[in-house]
């Protein structure tokens, strides 16, 4: 009797991302960040990105004595990352999508604060430093735990920031939000460590704005699909996926997204408008009878 063979479907880039972000406790931040760019052509090799980071970390580890103090490790990393390797903020093309792709950041040594921070934190962790990201208003930062406190670093410039400098950076945001006088909030609240999920969301939302401004609907759909997977309880991301799909003429899928948003956001101010839009999309997408 001939044996039958079963072919297992090849996982897509979206399947891979979904598996990476399924659980907070095991979410591999660097790998998930590298996987953001898998819809690009040619797609990056995520494992090669991770191997390159391992190689950069190994080169630095070999220079450090086994008993190097945390401050010695921090200073060595700063020189290595910002001076020798030449990582810096991309001042010439801040809004380029490549600034959010780790393989491009490694190739060009340029990025935005959050992508530079992910690379820095990966190297820091591999040389025994406890580095965490800070979702500071307007500018992502890094904090490194030291025996006598924490050092806050701007990954865009490599500058270590004092409390006075951090307070000064925070003032415009506080003024816009009315967080002054009786409503003032202490600096420490803005220096809490961001979770891996929060960091990924901020990276994806940066790309979301880049693609929306460029009206790059295929790439925007890819980003929105990842945001929906990453933040399943954020109904607005499902709404925005539907609006992006509508721009591509994916009317049935777009209507389904908008209806799901309305179902899960009964108090939303735009709920009825989105339901009306979903109805229009279903009418447009209905097959014609001949």
Image: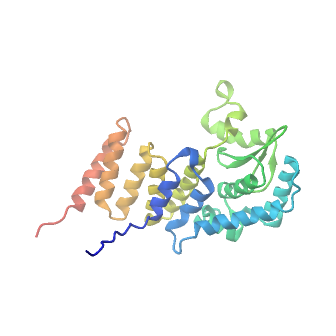
Q: Position of residue 142 (x, y in %)?
A: 72, 48
Q: Report the residue that reaches farthest toward the front.
A: 1
Q: At x 54% / y 53%, what residue is drawn?
A: 205
**For this rendering, which residue is in front, 29 or 212?**
29
Q: Does 58 sit left or right of 29 as displayed? A: right
Q: Does 231 sit left or right of 170 as displayed? A: left
Q: Where is residue 236 in the image (x, y as percent from the top left)?
A: 43, 46
Q: Where is residue 233 in the image (x, y as percent from the top left)?
A: 44, 42
Q: Is residue 237 at least partly visible in the picture? A: yes
Q: Is residue 52 above or below residue 113?
A: below
In the figure, residue 285 lies in which quadrant? bottom left
Q: Is residue 93 at least partly visible in the picture? A: no
Asked which colour scheme the image uses, the reply is rainbow
In the figure, residue 100 lies in which quadrant? bottom right
Q: Report the residue that reaches farthest toward the left.
A: 290
**For this rendering, which residue is in front, 57 or 85?**
57
Q: Position of residue 226 (x, y in %)?
A: 48, 55
Total number of numbered labels?
0
Name the quadrant of the C terminus: bottom left
Q: At x 73% / y 56%, what residue is drawn?
A: 120
Q: Does 161 sit left or right of 245 as displayed? A: right
Q: At x 76% / y 41%, what residue is drawn?
A: 166
Q: At x 58% / y 65%, what residue is drawn?
A: 97
Q: In this view, does 75 lie above or below 99?
A: above
Name the quadrant of the N terminus: bottom left
**For this rendering, which residue is in front, 6 or 151?**
6
Q: Is residue 17 above or below residue 48?
A: above
**For this rendering, which residue is in front, 65 or 276?**
65
């Amino acid at each position: 009797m001939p044996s039958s063979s079963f072919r297992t479907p090849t996982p897509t880039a979206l399947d891979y991302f979904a598996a990476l972000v399924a659980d907070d406790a095991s979410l591999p931040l660097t790998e998930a960040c590298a996987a953001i760019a898998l819809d690009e052509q040619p797609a990056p090799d995520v494992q090669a990105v991770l191997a390159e980071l391992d190689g950069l970390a190994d080169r630095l580890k070999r220079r450090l004595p086994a008993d190097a103090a945390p401050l010695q490790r921090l200073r060595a990393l700063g020189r290595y990352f910002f001076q020798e390797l030449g990582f810096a903020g991309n001042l010439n093309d801040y809004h380029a999508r490549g600034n959010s792709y780790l393989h491009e950041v490694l190739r060009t040594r340029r990025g935005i604060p959050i992508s530079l921070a992910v690379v820095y934190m990966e190297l820091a962790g591999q040389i025994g430093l406890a580095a965490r990201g800070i979702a500071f208003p307007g500018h992502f930062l890094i904090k490194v735990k030291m025996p006598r406190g924490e050092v806050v670093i701007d990954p865009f410039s490599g500058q270590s920031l004092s409390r006075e400098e951090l307070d000064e950076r925070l003032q415009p945001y506080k003024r816009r939000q009315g967080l002054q006088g009786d409503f003032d909030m202490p600096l420490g609240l803005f220096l809490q460590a961001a979770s891996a999920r929060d960091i990924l969301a901020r990276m994806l939302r940066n790309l979301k704005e880049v693609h929306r401004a460029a009206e790059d609907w295929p790439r925007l759909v890819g980003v929105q699909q990842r945001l929906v997977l990453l933040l399943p309880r954020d109904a607005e991301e499902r709404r925005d996926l539907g609006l992006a799909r509508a721009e591509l003429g994916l009317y049935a899928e777009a209507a389904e997204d908008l209806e799901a948003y309305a179902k899960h956001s009964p108090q939303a101010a735009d709920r009825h408008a989105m339901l009306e839009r979903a109805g229009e999309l279903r009418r447009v997408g209905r097959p014609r009878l001949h």
